[in-house]
């Protein structure tokens, strides 16, 4: 009997540099009878439990207290009345400063009897910006309203910027501006002072240390300076010495125009009028940002999701690649699990070695990954026309773009939306030095924020069962 409807219990776990929380969701997936691969699409997502938001626990050496963190999450499972064994899929995402402290798989293993069910990712500043744009609703809005949107997610330690156009994130950036870079205790003494806040104080000629009392007017000076450098990066590029000190990535690659701006993150709660006091400078920073909004040339819209602009889980659905066009080197070992997908925006009308290499490099950068350091799947929509000169040029471009991966003998996984995998695979083997470790698949529709499991081929090694795990965000 063919299954056309699947219900999954999913968990989304977010560990940030300032706060951590989780959310449980029910996901309903329905088979798309019109899809050539009969894939499952997410028809409904219902959040059934939003947990408490806690300060991310750190040890004295400034690494994550993984015992305290996992104990908190296990209590959240109990509060929600959910058995870890009942979780069928999900995502553990570690972002910001926390990403430097611990590996996400350790938390996934502590919270799941089968950690392979959970996508576990340590997100650097660019990938965190991509996730924030998707989680806030900015990326979906760019598609629904046909607008180019610059989103800015202001958290505790960083501000993550992204430009979304036509439902895709096309550029990302990040700067060390956040509401908890300086925090006070109940006696209004400094109890948290991060390096970026120290750099801002030095720029202003201020000198405070942990344990010092700091007047409100000096906190306002610090917050005002942070807001100024944030807007410098939002309007781009960072030119001042302080902005160049605080920016963690390249500048945004601006399109011709920005139609709308959108803020998310904890500080955005204050920007859009919420109240509260958290013994940090989040509220003051929001006031300073709000005062600068009139300087923007386009309107500011309110995010659907602000402090919870994050994943609510991951939905997994199975599909088979077209049986006639997959290409696999016999030396590869399957199955392979939890391979991150990198969208590569190669345009067949601009096909050249430089174009392909630059677009592959941009895809790695968007995920804060380095080519040759881990196995990835590169996804192309329409990169090349099926004629021999173009296929040969594309093949040699891939050999140049993936030089380190090829030299290390790593699996090279290329995935295409159109039915060209076999042609590409054969030409790569014939015309380049990449003779082994190649897997070329097609008729899949993937995106940034997807992970895939690839199982043993069937039907005479022609059909490849692929499980796609897509990050799931709240609906708008």
Image (cartoon, rainbow, N blue to C red):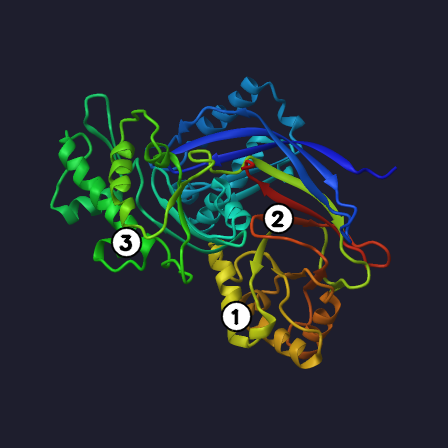
User: Residue 100 in the image: x percent, y percent?
Assistant: 41, 45
Q: Return the disc, 3 or 1, that comes first in the chain's sequence.
A: 3
Identify the residue shown where x is 43% and y is 35%: 306
Q: Nearer the viewer, mark 2 or mark 3?
A: 3
For disc 3, the marked residue is 232
Viewport quadrant of the C terminus: top right
Q: Nearer the viewer, mark 3 or mark 1?
A: 3
For disc 2, the marked residue is 451
Identify the residue shown where x is 72% and y is 58%: 443
For disc 1, the marked residue is 357
**Disc 2: CA contacts within 10 A as few (<14), some (14-19) or many (>=20):** many
User: Residue 465 in the image: x percent, y percent?
Assistant: 76, 50
Q: Which of 310 and 163 is in front in this view?
A: 163
Report the residue that reaches farthest toward the bottom: 389
Q: Return the disc, 2 or 1, that comes first in the chain's sequence.
A: 1
Give the Cα distance between marks 2 and 1: 23 Å
């Amino acid at each position: 009997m063919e299954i056309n409807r699947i219900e999954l219990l999913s968990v989304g776990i977010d560990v940030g540099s300032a706060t951590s929380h989780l959310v449980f969701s029910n996901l309903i997936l329905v088979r798309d009878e019109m899809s050539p691969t009969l894939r499952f699409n997410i028809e409904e997502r219902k959040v059934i439990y939003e947990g408490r938001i806690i300060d991310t626990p750190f040890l004295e050496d400034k690494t994550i207290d993984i015992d305290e963190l996992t104990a908190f999450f296990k209590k959240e499972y109990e509060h929600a009345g959910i058995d870890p064994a009942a979780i069928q899929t999900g995502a553990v995402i570690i972002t910001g400063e926390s990403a430097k402290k611990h590996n996400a798989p350790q938390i996934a293993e502590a919270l799941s009897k089968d950690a392979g069910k959970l996508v576990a990712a340590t997100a650097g500043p660019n990938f965190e910006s991509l996730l924030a744009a998707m989680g806030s609703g900015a990326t979906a809005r760019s598609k629904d309203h046909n607008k180019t949107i610059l989103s800015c997610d202001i958290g505790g330690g960083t501000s993550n910027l992204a430009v979304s156009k036509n439902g895709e994130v096309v550029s990302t950036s990040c700067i060390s501006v956040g509401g908890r870079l300086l925090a006070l205790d109940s006696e209004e003494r400094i109890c948290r002072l991060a390096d970026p806040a120290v750099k801002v104080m030095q720029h202003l000629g201020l000198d405070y240390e942990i344990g010092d009392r700091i007047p409100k007017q000096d906190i306002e000076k610090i917050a005002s300076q942070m807001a100024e450098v944030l807007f410098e990066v939002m309007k781009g590029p960072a030119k001042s010495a302080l902005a160049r000190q605080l920016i963690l990535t390249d500048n945004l690659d601006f399109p011709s125009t920005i139609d709308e701006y959108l803020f998310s993150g904890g500080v955005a709660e204050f920007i859009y009028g919420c109240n509260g006091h958290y013994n940090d400078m989040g509220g003051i920073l929001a006031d300073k940002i709000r005062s600068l909004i009139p300087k923007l040339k386009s309107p500011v819209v309110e995010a659907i999701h602000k402090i919870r602009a994050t994943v609510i889980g991951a939905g997994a659905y199975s599909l088979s690649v077209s049986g006639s066009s997959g290409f696999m080197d016999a030396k590869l070992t399957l199955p392979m699990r939890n391979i991150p997908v990198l969208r590569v925006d190669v345009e067949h009308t601009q096909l050249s070695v430089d174009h392909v290499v630059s677009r592959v490099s941009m895809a790695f950068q968007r995920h804060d990954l380095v080519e040759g350091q881990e196995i990835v799947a590169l996804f192309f929509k329409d990169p090349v026309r099926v004629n021999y000169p173009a296929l040969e040029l594309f093949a040699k471009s891939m050999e140049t773009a993936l030089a380190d991966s090829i030299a290390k003998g790593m699996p090279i996984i290329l995935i295409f939306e159109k039915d060209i995998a076999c042609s590409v695979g054969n030409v790569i083997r014939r015309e380049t030095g990449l003779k082994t470790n190649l897997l070329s698949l097609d008729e899949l529709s993937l995106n940034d924020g997807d992970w895939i499991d690839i199982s043993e081929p069937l039907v005479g090694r022609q059909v490849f069962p692929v499980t796609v795990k897509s990050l799931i965000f709240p609906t708008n």
